[in-house]
Amino acid sequence: MTYSQIPPDPETPRRIAFAIMALSSLALSGCAAYSPEALLHRYEGGVISSGPPPAPGLQSPWPNLATVPARPVSLSPQAQTAIRTRLQAANRGQNSLGGHHPASSKPAPPIPPVPSLRLGFAPRRAVLSSRQVALLRGFAAQRDGHPVLAAGFAPENAPGSLRLALLRAVAIANALEAAGVPPASIRIEALAGGRGGAAQVLYPRDPSTTPDAQDRS
């Protein structure tokens, strides 16, 4: 038996290389499509095997910018002052029906004998002078056991005005306490709209009312 040798085909090496490249690409794509994480999700099933939900409002129409309201007009300082005055009056009468004190046949309380004491402060300061401390000492001696209001004020347009007003009110309260007024008889108030501070005796509207029902003189 004789065997004849088939001559080599010059295209064979090129075809072998092309086949190897095709098999390599299929293997890499199979690894990417069937990663261990994807296989685990497919095995578990349920919600985890499904894709993420669509973003909220994805199918909603675009907003109509013509419906955006115009910028409100800023109030003048006079209008702001009027609004603040009305709110303060309503706050003082909030414990009464409709914000107004009911009519009473009882006589009005007598005019308090101790006038309020106004105190000035240096700009951006909350320190009392020795003369002001002496004035507060004399004021505390005349209160006749009534509670006292320690109020602090600061310009409304100044930065940190409410904090400055509170520091001034606390300084007045500390001086009153050092003058012998019990801390429970001192009421502190701070208002960002004014200057300086004040000390004022609080008198009850009726002798039978509680200390919370007391009004300013």
Image (cartoon, rainbow, N blue to C red):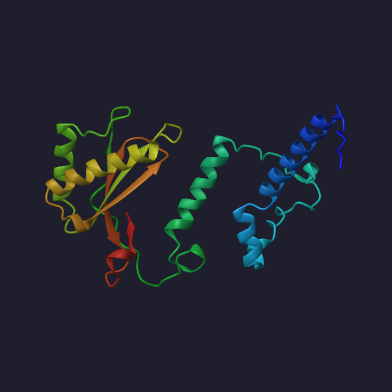
Residue 64 position in % (x across, y down): 80, 45
Which quadrant is home to the C terminus?
Answer: bottom left
* Residue at 77% from the left image edge and 39% from the top image edge: 22
Residue 113 position in % (x across, y down): 23, 52
* Residue at 60% from the left image edge and 54% from the top image edge: 36
Question: Looking at the image, is 103 positioned above or below residue 148?
Answer: below
Question: Count of labels shown?
Answer: 0
Residue 155 position in % (x across, y down): 41, 34
- Horizontal arrangement in the rendering, residue 210 relative to residue 73 (left or right): left
Q: Quadrant of residue 163?
A: top left
* Residue at 42% from the left image edge and 57% from the top image edge: 92
Q: Would you say residue 80 is visible in this rendering?
A: yes
Which quadrant is home to the N terminus?
Answer: top right
Q: Nearer the viewer, residue 150 or 201?
A: 150
Question: Looking at the image, is 23 positioned above or below residue 217?
Answer: above
Residue 132 position in % (x across, y down): 19, 35
Q: Quadrant of residue 29?
A: top right
Q: Would you say residue 116 is visible in this rendering?
A: no
Q: Nearer the viewer, residue 63 or 206?
A: 63
Name of the residue lying farthest toward the front: 1
- Horizontal arrangement in the rendering, residue 185 relative to residue 79 (left or right): left
- Horizontal arrangement in the rendering, residue 213 relative to residue 79 (left or right): left
